[in-house]
């Protein structure tokens, strides 16, 4: 359901029956019928790598975005004037509820461990629709504290009573703040030698940041996504070694790639733990590095029309700052 000044309007059958149905069409046609701006969306996590891009694209579509953040100054200057900024802290229940009041939906891009706080704010404010961004970390065979937080957050969403959707991205890459591939790119630019743990055979399936934005918007726009969960990732798995070689090819750079046996890395981790109370590398990290991260994206492809960007195309955009 969408809201126009607190009046419920269904995402009508007339629009959905049209072969030209699209999120933008819904927005434009229903605005035309009501003669008013349609909805206010509360967004948490706007200062993050994905959140700022989602806010920017929603605003470009004509949506009204209220971004709750503790640090308004971290919102890009060009975006700040196009959205409503609400300075507040999710851990302050009153502030969180105030931020949600008058909104039609919540897009929660803060870590899903904060889901209970988002749920509480939505329930207090009378907001029933919410899309939560989670993580494929929940699928690890070696669940550490962060993975357990992801699992607990998702369970809180499922039992919330809201009209929820969970979007579960794999490793997100794109801009310079992606905290994933960016570290690898910097290392390949800086050093003439790069290690390939286990020969680089482990499989990853990173997802381009704009594909994550598209999936979240598609879930918000389509009521069929309510009470469904979608894992989103790249179009196919790619070995770590292939990822590294792809980046080097796009950079037109040569680096010596040195295979490192996993047994050697595990020995280093064991020694580090024995020598230091705060080792730089742990056995837990090695185990997670070693496991394949391969995911089924077919439900997202079917329901959300999810068509992810191939890794090389995404890396070309990243290195060209076209993100």
Image: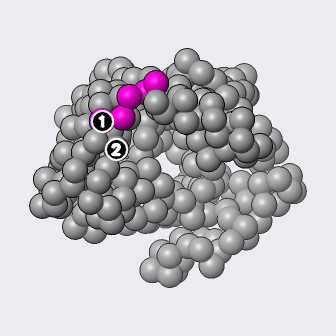
In percent of width and height, residue 305 lies at: 28, 32
Q: Is residue 22 visible?
A: no
Q: Secondary structure at mark 1?
A: strand
Q: Is residue 262 magenta?
A: yes
Which residue appears at 31% of the width and 21% of the height?
298
Label 1 CA crowd tier, 10 Å (few <14, some 14–19, many 20+): some
Left or right, 25 with respect to 265, comes to left
Q: Which of these two is toward me, 138 or 131?
A: 138
Residue 226, compared with residue 311, is above or below; it is above
Q: Is residue 306 magenta?
A: no
Q: Please say if the residues under marks 2 and 1 sit with CB atoms less than 8 Å apart.
A: yes
In percent of width and height, residue 143 lies at: 63, 24
Q: Which of these two is toward me, 102 or 312?
A: 312
Which residue appears at 39% of the width and 23% of the height?
292
In percent of width and height, residue 217 lies at: 42, 46
Give the magenta part as a residue range.
259-263
Which residue appears at 77% of the width and 65% of the height?
88
Distance between the alpha carbons at the discs numbered 2 and 1 = 6 Å
State the colouring used for the structure image. one colour
In percent of width and height, residue 138 lies at: 57, 26
State the quadrant of the C terminus: bottom left
Q: Which mark is residue 195?
A: 2
Residue wearing tag 1: 259
Which quadrant of the view contains residue 98?
bottom right
Q: Earlier in the sequence, mark 2 or mark 1?
A: 2
Q: Secondary structure at mark 2?
A: strand
Left or right, 314 with respect to 182, comes to left
Which residue appears at 54% of the width and 59% of the height?
48
Q: Which mark is residue 111?
A: none
Q: Which of these two is toward me, 240 or 67?
A: 240
State the quadrant of the N terminus: top right
């Amino acid at each position: 359901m969408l809201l126009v000044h607190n009046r419920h309007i269904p995402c009508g059958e007339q629009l959905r029956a049209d072969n030209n149905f699209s999120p933008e069409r819904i927005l434009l046609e229903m605005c035309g019928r009501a003669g008013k701006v349609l909805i206010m969306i509360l967004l948490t996590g706007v200062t993050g790598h994905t959140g700022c891009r989602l806010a920017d694209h929603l605003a470009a579509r004509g949506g009204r975005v209220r971004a709750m953040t503790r640090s308004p100054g971290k919102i890009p200057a060009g975006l700040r004037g196009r959205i409503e900024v609400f300075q507040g802290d999710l851990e302050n229940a009153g502030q969180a509820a105030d931020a949600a009041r008058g909104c039609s939906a919540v897009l929660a891009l803060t870590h899903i461990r904060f889901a209970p706080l988002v749920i509480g704010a939505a329930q207090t404010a009378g907001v029933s629709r919410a899309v939560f961004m989670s993580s494929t970390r929940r699928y690890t065979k070696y669940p550490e504290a962060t993975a357990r937080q992801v699992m607990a957050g998702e369970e809180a969403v499922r039992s919330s009573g809201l009209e929820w959707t969970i979007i579960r991205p794999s490793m997100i890459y794109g801009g310079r703040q992606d905290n994933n591939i960016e570290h690898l790119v910097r290392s390949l630019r800086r050093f003439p030698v790069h290690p390939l743990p286990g020969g680089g055979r482990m499989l990853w399936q990173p997802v381009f940041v704009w594909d994550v934005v598209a999936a979240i918007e598609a879930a918000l726009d389509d009521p069929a996504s309510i009470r469904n969960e979608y894992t989103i990732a790249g179009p196919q798995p790619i070995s770590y070694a292939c990822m590294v070689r792809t980046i080097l090819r796009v950079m037109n750079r040569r680096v010596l790639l040195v295979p490192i046996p996993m047994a050697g890395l595990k020995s280093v981790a064991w020694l580090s733990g024995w020598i230091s109370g705060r080792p730089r590398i742990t056995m837990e990290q090695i185990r997670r590095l070693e496991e394949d991260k391969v995911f089924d994206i077919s439900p997202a492809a079917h329901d959300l029309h999810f068509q992810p960007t191939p890794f090389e195309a995404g890396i070309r955009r990243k290195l060209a700052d076209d993100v």
